[in-house]
Amino acid sequence: MRKNREKLIFNGKDLKNLKKYGKRRIKSELYSKGIDAEYVEEAVSYLDEDEEDMLLPLVEKRLKGDFEKKNIDKCIRYFMYRGYGFSDIKNCIDNIKEEYGE
């Protein structure tokens, strides 16, 4: 059983680091594989808490300095689908806007 837990934790870290998924999407992916909620929560607890640090460069790359409403909405949908929270995404966009002086 210990081996399964380690594999599960490793799987969660892979989804975060390689696919750049947020916690919500990682939980969803693990649940869809039929893993018990207890183990999913344990695996997610091992992930770094601050998603915003990882999200900021991803949002900046996605926006490419284009702050039109259409592009911002597209960016928000993109990252929400990948499991990030709206407030985290919005904070990143606001920080990037400040850097660009918008």
Image (cartoon, grey):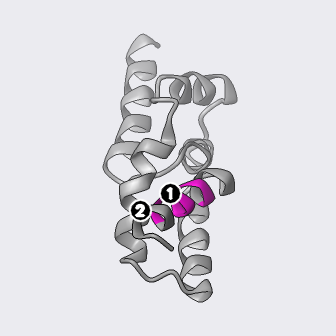
Where does the image place residue 12, in percent across and percent down from the top left? 44, 36
Q: Residue furthest front?
A: 101
Element type at mark 2:
helix
Q: CA distance from mark 1 to mark 2?
A: 6 Å
Task: State the mark number for residue 78.
Answer: none
Depth check: 28 or 46 in front? 46
Q: Would residue 50 be found to the left or right of residue 76 on screen? A: left
Q: Is residue 36 above or below residue 20?
A: above
Give the residues in magenta.
Answer: 90-96
Q: In the displayed structure, would residue 11 be above or below residue 38? A: below
Q: Position of residue 32 (x, y in %)?
A: 60, 49
Disc 1 designates what residue? 95
Image spot of residue 40 (x, y percent): 59, 30
Task: Assess disc 1: are there few (<14), some (14-19) or many (≥20) residues with their C-alpha within 10 Å of its C-alpha.
Answer: some
Q: Is residue 1 above or below residue 87?
A: above
The structure residue drawn at horizontal position 49% and vertical position 67%, both measured from the top left corner, is 97
Residue depicted at 52% across the width and 48% down the height: 22
Q: What's the residue at 53%, 63% (across, down)?
A: 93
Q: Residue furthest top?
A: 2
Residue named by callout 2: 99
Q: Is residue 23 left or right of residue 8?
A: right
Q: Quadrant of residue 11?
A: top left
Residue 92 included in the magenta stretch of the image: yes
Circles 1 and 2, Cβ within 8 Å, touching? The answer is yes
In the image, what residue occupies the spot 43% across and 22% down?
A: 4
Q: Judge whether residue 98 is colored magenta.
A: no
